[in-house]
C-alpha cells in the first residue's frame, strides 16, 4: 500500500505512567521511545481524567476552552437532576444536540473539512471514544469501538464479519486490545487508508484501577498492550500503515488509599456537589462571598487537597485559600465555581507511589487519577517517522493540547483556533530557536491549609508540572 505523505497514527496507552515504561514491562515501547523523539517533560491536563484528556487531545485546547470540564459534573441544561456523566452516550448526545458539549473543533471535523481521511479504533469507554472521535461519524469517517452504538455501523458490521464478535471485557483487557489491533491493521488501513488515525488502548488504565499500579495483573496488562504495539511496529516495518507513529498516554495513576463520603462530609452542599477525587461544588448563587465561604469550609477539612475557584466575571480572580482555575487551563462557564481535589501524599520511599483519598469507584489500593501529583500528570509522548527527528530526548515541556497542532502541521493543515503549540523542536528539517521556557510557583494559604502548583511557561503558556497541598491534621487512612 502507498503511504500518504505525512500520514500519522496516534497510539494511546491509557493511564500509563512514564516511569512505568521499562524494558522489562514494555520492551517495544521502550525501544520506540529511545529511537525516535522522546518528550521527557510531557504532561496531562487538569483534571487528569480520561474524557477530559481525550477531548483536549483532539481539540488542541485546554478544558477551560473546550468545555468538557470533568468526567462528570452538574449541567442542569442537560440533566435537570443529578450529574451529567460523560460516560453516558445519551448524556453526550443531549448536550451535543443543545450545542453545549464542546466549544472547539475536533481533529475529525478538521480533517473532514480538509478532504482528509480520519479513523478511530478504540477499546476505551464509550464516552472517551465518542469524544476522541467527535465529529467523525457525521462526516462519514470510520470509527470502531468495543461498545455498541458508538462505532460507525458499516465498520462495526465488517469487523464482526471478518474477525468475529468483540471479546468480553476483562482485566487485563488484552483480548480486546488484540482484537482491535487486527481491526486497525487488517481492515481500517487497507480499506480506508486514513491520513490520521487514533488507536486507543484501555490498558493499563482499567487493570491498574482494579489491582494497583505494580500488581502482577497490571504488569501483565502492560506487557499485553506492549505486545499489541509490537505487532503494529512489525506491520509498519513491512511497508504497511502510516509514515509516522506518535505514542502517548493521557494521564498516569497513583494509589487510592482510603475512601471519603463527600456527600456525608458536606451535607449542606450535597445537592450541588459533583463528588470524586476531583470534585466540583456548584453553588446556586455563586457570589464572591459565597465562594469564599465555601473555600474556607473546605480548607478546614483534613481530607481537602487543592482548591480552585472560577469567579463569575473575574477569570483570573481568586479568594483566600484558593487558586484561580484559569491558571490550570480551567475556568470555563460550565466549570464549578469551586473545585477541589482530595488530599494526596508523596511517596513514602524513593521510587514509590503517591497516595490519595478518593470518592467511590475503586477499592483501596487501586489506581486513581484526576489530580495534580507528578505521577498523574507525567505522561508518555514520543514519535518516530520521516516527519520527526531521530534519537532526540527533548526536555522542552509540552502537554496534551500540543498533540493535535503538531500532527496537523505534519499533514500540512492549519491549526487556527487551537491554543496548543506545534512542537517544532521535534520535527525533522526544522531549524529554529527553541521556545522560551520559564518557571513559576503559585501558592495559596488559609489557616493550616497550604497548596501550590509548579508550572512551566512555554512561550508564555502555562503547563503544570505538579501540585501539592498540606492541611490540618493527618491524611485520613
Image (spheres, rainbow, N blue to C red):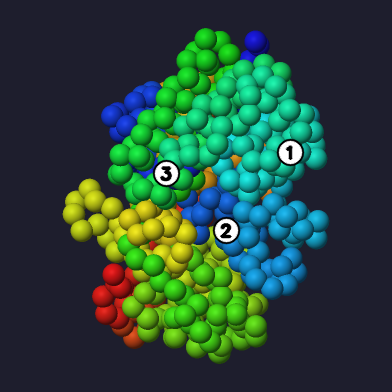
Q: Residue at x 47, y 25 (%)?
A: 228
Residue under pointer 3: 207
State the residue position of label 1: 136
Q: Is residue 295 left or right of residue 285?
A: left
| 231 vs 276: above or below | above
- Please say if 29 is above or below 287: above
Q: Earlier in the sequence, mark 2 or mark 3?
A: 2
**SS for callout 2:** loop
Residue at image coords 74%, 65%: 78
On the rendered image, what quadrant is the C terminus found in?
Answer: bottom left
Q: Residues within 10 Å of mark 2 (few under 14, many from 20)?
A: many
User: Contact, CB < 8 Å: mark 1 with mark 3?
Assistant: no
Classify residue 395 by image quadrant: top left
- Front of the two marks 1 and 3: 3
Q: Is residue 415 visible?
A: no
- 74 lies left or right of 152: left
Circle 3 crowding by C-alpha within 10 Å: few under 14, some 14–19, many from 20: many
Which of the two discs, 2 and 3, sits closer to the camera? 3
Q: Horizontal and vertical percent for residue 413?
A: 69, 33
Nearest the camera: 455 or 183? 183
Alpha carbon distance from label 1 to label 3: 29 Å
In the displayed structure, would residue 11 be above or below residue 269? Answer: above
Whole-percent x, y for residue 138 in the image: 80, 40
Mark 1: few, some, or many residues within 10 Å (few <14, many ≥20)?
A: many
Q: Secondary structure at mark 3?
A: helix
| Residue position for label 2 | 71
The mark that comes first in sequence, 1 or 3, is 1
Q: Report the Cα–Cα distance between label 2 and label 3.
A: 19 Å
Task: Tell me where residue 53 appears, x and y as whole percent.
Answer: 55, 50
First along the sequence among labels 2 and 1: 2
Amino acid at each position: 500500500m502507498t503511504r500518504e505523505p505525512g500520514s500519522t497514527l496516534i497510539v494511546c496507552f491509557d493511564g500509563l505512567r512514564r516511569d512505568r515504561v521499562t524494558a522489562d514491562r514494555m520492551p517495544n515501547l521502550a525501544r520506540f521511545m529511545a529511537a525516535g523523539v522522546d518528550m521527557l517533560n510531557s504532561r496531562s491536563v487538569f483534571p487528569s481524567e480520561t474524557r477530559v484528556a481525550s477531548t483536549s487531545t483532539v481539540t488542541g485546547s485546554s478544558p477551560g476552552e473546550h468545555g468538557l470540564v470533568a468526567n462528570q459534573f452538574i449541567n442542569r441544561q442537560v440533566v435537570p437532576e443529578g450529574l451529567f456523566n460523560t460516560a453516558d452516550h445519551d448524556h453526550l448526545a443531549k448536550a451535543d444536540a443543545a450545542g453545549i458539549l464542546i466549544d472547539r473543533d475536533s481533529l475529525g471535523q478538521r480533517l473532514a473539512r480538509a478532504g482528509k481521511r480520519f479513523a478511530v479504533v478504540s477499546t476505551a469507554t464509550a464516552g472517551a471514544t465518542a469524544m476522541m472521535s467527535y465529529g467523525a461519524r457525521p462526516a462519514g469517517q470510520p470509527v470502531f469501538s468495543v461498545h455498541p452504538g458508538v462505532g460507525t455501523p458499516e465498520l462495526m458490521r465488517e469487523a464482526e464479519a471478518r474477525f468475529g464478535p468483540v471479546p468480553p471485557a476483562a482485566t487485563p483487557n488484552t483480548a480486546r486490545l488484540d482484537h482491535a489491533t487486527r481491526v486497525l491493521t487488517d481492515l481500517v488501513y487497507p480499506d480506508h487508508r486514513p491520513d490520521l488515525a487514533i488507536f486507543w488502548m484501555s490498558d493499563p488504565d482499567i487493570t491498574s484501577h482494579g489491582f494497583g499500579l505494580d500488581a502482577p495483573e497490571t504488569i501483565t496488562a502492560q506487557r499485553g498492550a506492549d505486545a499489541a504495539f509490537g505487532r503494529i511496529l512489525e506491520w509498519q516495518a513491512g511497508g504497511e500503515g502510516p509514515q509516522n507513529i506518535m505514542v502517548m498516554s493521557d494521564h498516569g495513576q497513583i494509589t487510592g488509599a482510603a475512601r471519603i463520603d463527600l456527600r456525608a462530609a458536606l451535607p449542606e452542599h450535597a445537592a450541588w456537589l459533583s463528588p470524586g477525587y476531583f470534585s466540583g461544588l456548584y453553588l446556586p448563587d455563586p457570589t464572591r462571598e459565597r465562594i469564599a465561604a465555601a473555600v474556607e469550609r473546605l480548607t478546614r477539612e483534613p481530607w481537602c487537597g487543592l482548591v480552585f475557584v472560577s469567579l463569575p466575571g473575574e477569570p483570573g480572580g481568586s479568594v483566600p485559600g484558593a487558586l484561580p482555575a484559569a491558571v490550570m487551563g480551567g475556568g470555563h462557564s460550565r466549570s464549578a465555581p469551586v473545585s477541589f481535589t482530595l488530599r494526596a501524599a508523596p511517596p513514602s520511599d524513593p521510587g514509590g507511589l503517591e497516595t490519595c483519598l478518593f470518592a467511590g469507584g475503586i477499592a483501596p489500593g487501586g489506581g486513581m487519577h484526576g489530580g495534580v501529583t507528578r505521577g498523574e500528570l507525567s505522561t508518555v509522548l514520543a514519535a518516530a517517522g520521516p516527519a520527526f527527528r531521530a534519537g532526540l530526548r527533548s526536555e522542552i515541556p509540552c502537554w496534551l493540547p500540543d498533540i493535535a497542532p503538531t500532527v496537523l502541521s505534519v499533514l500540512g493543515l492549519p491549526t487556527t483556533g487551537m491554543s496548543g503549540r506545534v512542537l517544532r523542536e521535534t520535527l525533522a528539517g526544522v531549524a529554529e530557536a527553541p521556545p522560551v521556557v520559564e518557571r513559576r510557583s503559585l501558592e495559596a494559604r488559609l489557616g493550616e491549609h497550604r497548596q501550590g502548583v509548579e508550572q512551566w511557561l512555554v512561550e508564555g503558556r502555562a503547563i503544570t508540572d505538579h501540585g501539592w497541598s498540606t492541611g490540618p491534621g493527618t491524611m485520613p487512612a
